[in-house]
Image (cartoon, rainbow, N blue to C red):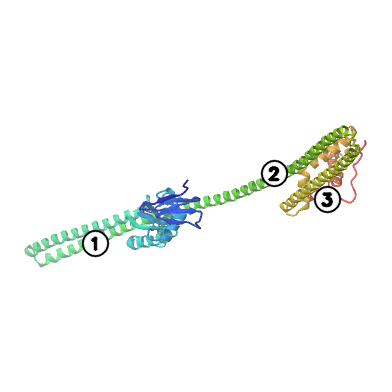
Amino acid sequence: MCFWWYKVADASEYLVITGAWINDLKIKKKALILPGQKFTRIELSPVNYTFNVQAMSAEKLPFILPAVFTIGPQVNDMEAIIKYAKLLSNHERDSAHVKELVQGVIEGETRVLAASMTMEEVFKGTKEFKQEVFAKVQLELNQFGLFIYNANVKQLVDVPGHEYFSYLGQKTQMEAANQAKVDVAEATMKGEVGAKLRQGQTLQNAAKIDAETKIISTQRQGEGKKEEVRVHTEVKVYENQREAEVAEANAELAKKKAVWDKEAKVAQVEAAKAVSIREAQLQKEVEKVNAMTMTEKLKADILSKAMVEAETKAQEASWQLNQKQKAADAILYQKEKEAEAMKAVADAQMYARQKAAEGEFYAKNKEAEALEAMGQAQGHYLQYLMEANGRDYSATRDYMMINNRMYPEIARINADAVRGLQPKISIWSNGGEAADGGAGSSNTAMKEIAGVYKMLPPLFNTVHEQTGMLPPNWMGTLSAEGSQPKNIEA
């Protein structure tokens, strides 16, 4: 039966082979796939990616850069194909993952380059800006084995709400229209003045021509002042509009930065909390596995001991059956071979005693091994608890007493000791506090409560004697002399 296959790739494909007898991976057009090997086909045809990259200039003016990139593996570079096979062979060439990867590289390099240039530099040096973006993007894509076969960047577009290029075009159009109007007015004025001048020269004398000349000069000065005032007014309006747009862009950017900072801080806090929760879960799973391991080991020891005892009992039963058979044979041949029977009985008794002794020795030996293994397991468990508690003997002792339910057992024993005694406790007061007035009587209840707190030292002494534990420092320390309750009768 044949367990290998001969595979051939298409013209625009390569076979990526991994598995047995291959250290890393092998790139082939055709190959024999052996048992223990796997192969994957990678497509080398380039794919078109269309993006609308949003960037911001050095003056914090946003704009959109529409671009179409034709990107694919570099077919003439085997090292680049190996990179592509290692990093992107599990994804389709037009998948969302690859598109997001390419888009992230293009947007990142475009934004970094645009942030170092003014809007005027970007607009005037569009060709150099595009070439710089292509070079930086290709440098980043080399690490993935990708190559830019073609790139086409369209005209820069305004971001909605920030119509810089639109206003710049309107400004150019208005300046051309205003200049045309000025030229037409000047031509009209020259024609009228020339006609009047010709009429004055023909119909009037030199005095009238001088007067008309002064009048025309005054009129032209007034028109020039009017045009200058109008142009200054338009420039001032445009400057105010640009300042308002810049202020609005700065405010919008500040709002976005605040939102981004808030989201980043929240993500950091959530990540830290998630790590703490995961660590606690892993620690809990480790403790469960350790407990299960110890339980299974103890079960195995008990099972082996039971098997040894069962085997011993089976040997004893077999021996008893053999003895009965030998006794029957001895009775049958008693008359003929009495001496031999007596010897056989003696030998059998000696053999039985020897086997019984060996069985008892084996059982005791296995029991000792089980006790030794249990002691070792408990020693490893105690060592693990000490390491987990930072080599703190008190914390380990408290954990074992809580885990083994020692405190409920101590409470039960003490309760059994006084059960049925029905002690009677009387608290006597001579009423002296009442003689001091209303203040003394109001403090009586607090003094009784203070008396209850005076009973705590004997209780701490009892717990210390039975468990060896001391109360925490915030509750106080035990003195050398034990406190005695006041006015207690049985």
Residue 441 seen? no
Identify the residue position indicated by label 1 in the image: 224
Q: Left or right? Give the position of 210 relative to 59.
A: left
Location of the C terminus by quadrant is top right
Closer to the eye: label 3 or 2: 2
Q: Considering the numbered disc 2 on the image, is that residue within a helix, a strand or a loop? A: helix
Image location of residue 2, percent across then percent down: 46, 47
Image location of residue 379, percent across then percent down: 77, 51
Which residue lies at the image location 75% right of the left edge and 44% below the top edge? 301
Question: Which mark, by number, is residue 477?
Answer: 3
The disc, 1 or 2, on the residue closer to the chain's N-terminal end is 1
The answer to whether residue 31 is above or below residue 336 is below
Q: Left or right? Give the position of 280 relative to 372.
A: left
Image location of residue 194, percent across then percent down: 12, 62
Question: Which mark, by number, is residue 292?
Answer: 2
The type of residue carrying mark 2 is Met
